[in-house]
Image (cartoon, rainbow, N blue to C red):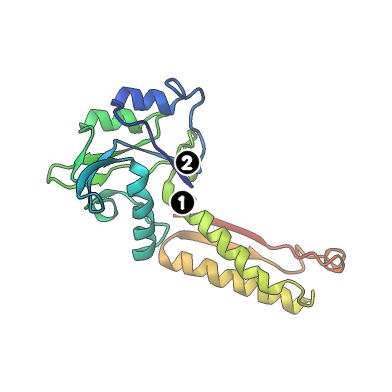
Amino acid sequence: TYIADPPVGYSKENVIKWHNGKLVRTTAITSKFAEVYSPWCKVYDSTSSSYVWVMPSVLMAAKFVAVDKAYGSWYAPAGETNGILSSVLDVENKYKREDRDALYVDYNRINPIIEYSNGNIMVYGEKTCQRKNTVLTKIHTVRMVIELKRKLQASLRGFIFQPNIQGSLSKIQSTISAIMEKYKSGGGLDSYTVVCDSSNNTTETMQQDIVNVDVACVPN
């Protein structure tokens, strides 16, 4: 996924216009692979020994990695548990509740970075820029699916040029199922199915050195 940063100095209203393609941009950001956070944040730069304002992507890229490492890609990088930005000293705009709602509800998909009542600065949203409300509106779901696809693809490389026989199909199904089970037991998936047998691999396809693997899952 990628993080699209609004220009520095934008008010709440201008960030909304910008991400909807009505200010500077001529098209709205609508991809499920994109995220928008606001506002910019102040951090201490040890290299220059000074305080600087940085775009949200600088912080969120590191936050994604930290949450993945500590919990898993299926955990939301937001809220009091996983969304605290401890290195941030100040935020460019201090959003009130009604501001957060305006950024985040209806067809707006801007994830607010807020200063909470206890002084903590945290991410208080986790929507992708997909405008249709599905499971792919959630950042953690999209990132988990991307990671899962990469792992499944990597696991199948070892079967290239192996004998295209029924025994190989069983091994493939077991390999894929083991990966899916880790995500299910970890809390990322509610359920899954893996099919790699004679029902989707006919004699004709096997003679052409084609192996079909059907994988379906229901994210939590």
Q: Which three-letter amino acid code belongs to the residue tagged 2?
A: Ala
Compare marks 2 and 1 and give the one earlier in the sequence: 2
Q: Position of residue 21 (x, y in %)?
A: 47, 24
Tell me the quadrant of the picture where the C terminus can be found.
bottom left
Hey, which quadrant is residue 115 in on the image? top left
Number of the label disc, if any, that sits on residue 36: none
Q: Which three-letter amino acid code belongs to the residue tagged 1?
A: Thr
Question: Distance of mark 2 from mark 1, alpha carbons?
Answer: 13 Å
Number of the label disc, if any, that sits on residue 34: 2
Give the farthest residue toward the front: 48
Hey, which quadrant is residue 152 in on the image? bottom right
Number of the label disc, if any, that sits on residue 141: 1
> Residue 96, relative to residue 189: is it above or below?
above
Q: Position of residue 33 (x, y in %)?
A: 50, 43
- Relative to 171, is 122 on the left or the right? left
Question: Of circles 2 and 1, which is in front?
Answer: 2
- In percent of the image, x 49 and y 45: which residue is there? 136
Give the farthest residue toward the top: 22
